[in-house]
Image (cartoon, rainbow, N blue to C red):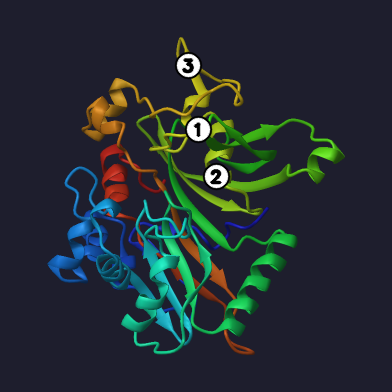
Amino acid sequence: MGGYRGLGPVWGGWRRGPGVRAAPEAAGFGTEAGHQLRRRGSSKRSGPLRDQLFPGLLQLENLSREGLVDVLRAAVVDQKGPLVTLNKPPGLPVTGKPGELTLFSVLPELSQSLGLRDRELQVVQASGKETSGLVLLSSCPQTASRLQKFFIHSRRAQRPTATYCAVTDGIPASSEGNIQVALKLEHIDGIDLVIPVKSPSRKDLQEGVKRTLSHFHVVARGSGCALVQLQPLTVFPSQLQVHLVLQLCPVLGDHTYSARVGTVLGQRFLLPAESTKPQRQVLDEALLRRLHLTPAQAAQLPLHLHLHCLHLPGMRPREAPMKLLAPLPPYFSRTLQCLGLHQQ
């Protein structure tokens, strides 16, 4: 699979396609670049994103609706025609129950704040709650519909449109490859969990089991960890987290599925998914020292999974394809520095 040709990162900045206006902070992954998101707004706006231990982590419980609109407005990395691109901080759900503070719940106010008047934004593509990165919004229903069809057709043709960055606890055995497994969603002890299914039957596939596929590429290795690029070719909840657990390399900050990886005498193995309850990720002492964290602090480590890049078709006939980019959160950049993870 050649999906990564021409996609590789340059540590002074990621390559971007013609006609794409990227935010200034996309020019680098270092600490200086990571802090740009917070600098764009006023000190009042950046307040909810201030966290000395994990800078850039959203404190949703301390936010009002108006505060969240301010945060999202400061997180805009591109606005072109009907399309608005945000760099979502982790911890913000896209949807939720009535009355909950979510991205969807403040779209009317955000639309007004961005001067869209009667053209209310709708979500076209978004990263999950604990995942940071790109959110694509559109104020034009026809454009939104066309882009959603584009994503569906791309998946059917197995053409990747999204690239994620992840830091893993452990290094995949292969530097590049595909992860292919059937998954199902099960409600266990009051929690919805994703469970791998071996050799699914036709009945399984009719009852919610789905064959999933992701491509991965190890960009850098260091301190027993890896920086990995991931391109999902199917869509399933927590797909990338579960796929990396099956490689015995859980995402750093995965406090749901990392417990499925056990270790005996330095050898890793998979524990039964159905009977392994979620728990806070446990990191070895050497890794804690490199990250300058105590075990209690590591238990609050945010998920290091970031939707970095989206490929879109041109908005008009004969217009060049677009590549949208979102810089890494400050805590993610800090982790890369602590672990010495640089492109090799």
Q: CA distance from mark 2 to mark 3?
A: 23 Å
Residue placed under numbered mark 3 in the picture: 263
Residue placed under numbered mark 1 in the picture: 257
| Rendering coords of residue 202 (x, y %) | 86, 40
Q: Secondary structure at mark 1?
A: loop
The quadrant where residue 255 appears? top left
Residue under the point 30% across and 70% down: 69
Dot 2 and dot 1 residues touching (CB under 8 Å): yes
Q: In this view of the protein, can residue 216 be seen by the observer?
A: yes
| Rendering coords of residue 314 (x, y %) | 58, 82
> Between disc 2 and disc 3, whose residue precedes?
2
Q: Amino acid at mark 3?
A: Thr
The quadrant where residue 205 appears? top right
Name the mark on residue 193: none
Q: Secondary structure at mark 2?
A: loop
Foreground label between 1 and 3: 1
Q: Amino acid at mark 2?
A: Ser
Name the mark on residue 238: 2
> How many numbered badges does the structure rendering display?
3
Residue under the point 80% across and 38% down: 204
